[in-house]
Image (cartoon, rainbow, N blue to C red):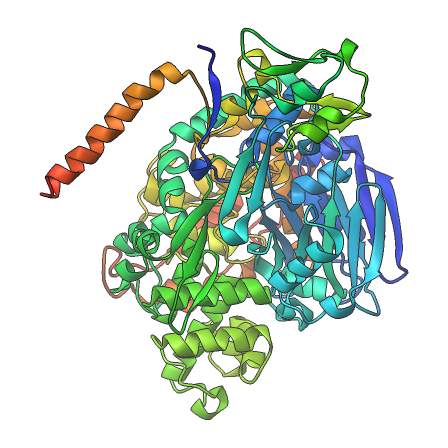
Amino acid sequence: MPAILVVDPEKCTSCRLCELACSQHSGGVFRPSRARIRIAIRSEEAFYFPMICLQCDDAPCMLACSVDALVRDPTTNAVVLIEERCNECGICGAACSYGAIDFVEDKPRKCDLCGGDPECVRFCAAGALRFETPEHWPEAQRQAYADRLENLVEEGKV
Amino acid sequence: MHAYTGTILRVDLGRQRIHTEPLDPASARAFVGGRGLATKMFCDEVDPAVDPLDPANKLILATGPLTGTSAVCGGRFMVVTKGALTGAIACSNAGGDFGPELKFAGYDMIVFEGAATEPVILVINDDDVELRPAGELWGKDVHQTEDALHEQLGKAFKCVSIGPAGETLVRFASIMTDKNRAAGRSGVGAVMGSKRLKAVAVRGTGGLSVADPEVFRTACLDALAKLKDGELTGIALPQLGTPVLVNVINDSGAFPTRNFQEGQFASAQKISGETMAEQIVVRRRACVACPIACGRLTAVPDGKFKGRGEGPEYETIWAFGADTGVSDLAAVAKANYICNELGMDTISAGATIACAMELLEKGALPEGEVGCDLRFGNAEAMVDMVTRIGRRQGFGDVLAEGSARVAEKYGRPELFMGAKKLEAPAYDPRGVFGMGLQYATSNRGACHVRGFMIAPEILGIPEKLDPLAPGGKAAMDIAFQDLTAAVDSSGICLFVTFSIGTPEIQALLKPATGFDYDVDEIMQAGERVWNLERLFNLRAGFSRKDDALPQRLLHEPMPAGPAEGKTVPLDEMLAEYYRLRSWDDQGRPTKQKLDALSL
């Protein structure tokens, strides 16, 4: 089971280290305007949300592409661009509801999960971004469930 | 150049002319950037005798080489000018998101010269830079100003601005960014106001390179891991923010209470970081590139102090809490919100009110002049007075001059608690001697962030020093002052130094800039900056007599608590400080020292 980029928005602190790290890793310079992950920050409402490519099943960008330039990477499960095939029509961007595809000089740019070792995760000190395989989740869920039960017992409610 | 954009933006507000000039690589290496490089340029260009509010004073907004990179806490920018409150060299720095955005737009710093005849704003959209009339923005508070700028220009623009306090030249007005972050101290906002510059809005879409990306990345991840593992940077500050210090400092008996009359506040628990977390904290908030996230979005949901904003920080809690004798956390938060909105320094605002409270208590200030019952502990009067100061209404107009001038005006200059006209912050040096030396020698006046001696004296970083003994304080203070100057010049936050030191900073700066820095050169750059600031102050008329503390701290023993009976042995520490700095007995850098620093 390939790992998934997991977002835990409640842990995000809005520091944008992910944007900086992503832009450097993918483009060779610190340039948040070209980062493939962006933090939506509405501090008045205490709302910050890391916005990533969801690597959707039945990805609309892939379905929209008439030249098969977007394909599923069998190892990482990421939707990746094969540049040589791209005809720069832009339809993939229009098809995405999440703004996960940017265009630089008409060429689409999107998150490819860094080939299976996402740089944004390495720089996320808050733990808002994690790269995990689903097989680890049930155990974590059981532990959380046990914690809740333990609290209830301590509070005399069970 | 790497890590620098290589371009300085120069804005002549009088002639309404804008041009760019290249950054000098040799100066950049010697002064690193930020505070250092801006101070170098400022000292080269400005007569030290200038009146801070005269158009001939300049105002520099400067980033460092690490600003805008993934270096830990690399979100800072500095404001360098001659301070309106102090008349000394001022460097106030702030986080938020403005500094990195300025670099992505392509500029290391902005130098403002002259003064506009009508209020203006500067709008920077990458290469497009223009001055526009401020129009209806003049008169608006900081939040309204940023909202209006976002409405006009788009939300992608990052802003710095002044509020009504800066416009009306409140001596301790701050420059605000990201609504609630402040380049707070020394009156930099009044200088901006005197230039009729309401705001700067910047949008940058460009990129910033470093010289050796792989080595730099490793250094970034190493520093990040150390900050995550650090007790303060990984646990205490993320959990409670700077207010974690309220109980710590109160317990050590160095929590100045009622204008430094006592060193412990009986109601400290009511305004502590722990209480704040329970009662008003909504969410953490980080500056760009900061893994600590000490900022706090807060809200007082109802009651007479209802409000919403960011803070209070530790110093603010003290200023509007213990120093004014107020134990109502909601009132403290409200006073903070008002300061952010009107654009003024919370430390000086609170401390000036505390000074007025003592003047009133001692009968030096006629009650009729004040217009409200400004007694220690009166939360409502305190909050009311904050608004009056920020808008220069009624007695607020008097207090807007700062406590040194207020105490002088009412014939009790000794009741000003600070140095070089800058109000001392939240540590009573009778309980932390090294902090006393720091207040007396700091180039911008009594200040904690030029050499945070609380680290060794209370927290044991990098080693524990006895807070109630003078030994070793001069050497440690010098090391902290020089390190801080280097950090401020690099563009990262001082808080990194709780967990990393010069080796890690060198490991970041060298691959970022491509300069072949070693650890000694970076510390020497800090020392160079410190001495340069000192030279400016000497030429501005400061001398040994200004390296002083209030009489209370030197001669009135601390009445109770762990520091009971103590006064600050300043003369002894100061003599050693001058000697170790290679300054003469009048506090003037010797020729040999200046030669060694190439100054």
Query: Is residue B70 among the parts visible in the rendering?
Result: no
Outermost residue to the bottom: B368
Identify the residue shown where x is 28% and y is 61%: B270
Query: Is residue B533 among the parts visible in the rendering?
Result: yes
Quadrant for the N terminus of chain B in the image: top right
Quadrant for the C terminus of chain B in the image: top right
Outermost residue to the top: A74
* In front of the other: B475 or B334: B334
Relative side of B552 to B368, left or right? left
* In front of the other: B582 or B503: B503
Q: Vertically, is A46 above or below A7? A: below
Identify the residue shown where x is 71% and y is 28%: A93
Asked where in the image residue A65 lies, by quadrant, the reply is: top right
Relative side of A113 to B194, left or right? left
Residue B470: x %, y % from top left: 36, 47
Count of marks, rendered view = 0
* In front of the other: B311 or B12: B311
Relative side of B442 to B128, left or right? left
Q: Vertically, is B536 above or below B565? A: above
Residue A80: x %, y % from top left: 65, 14
Identify the residue shown where x is 59% and y is 64%: B343
Residue B547: x %, y % from top left: 52, 58
* In front of the other: B534 or A93: A93
Relative side of B52 to B86, left or right? right
Asked where in the image residue B463 lies, by quadrant, the reply is: top left
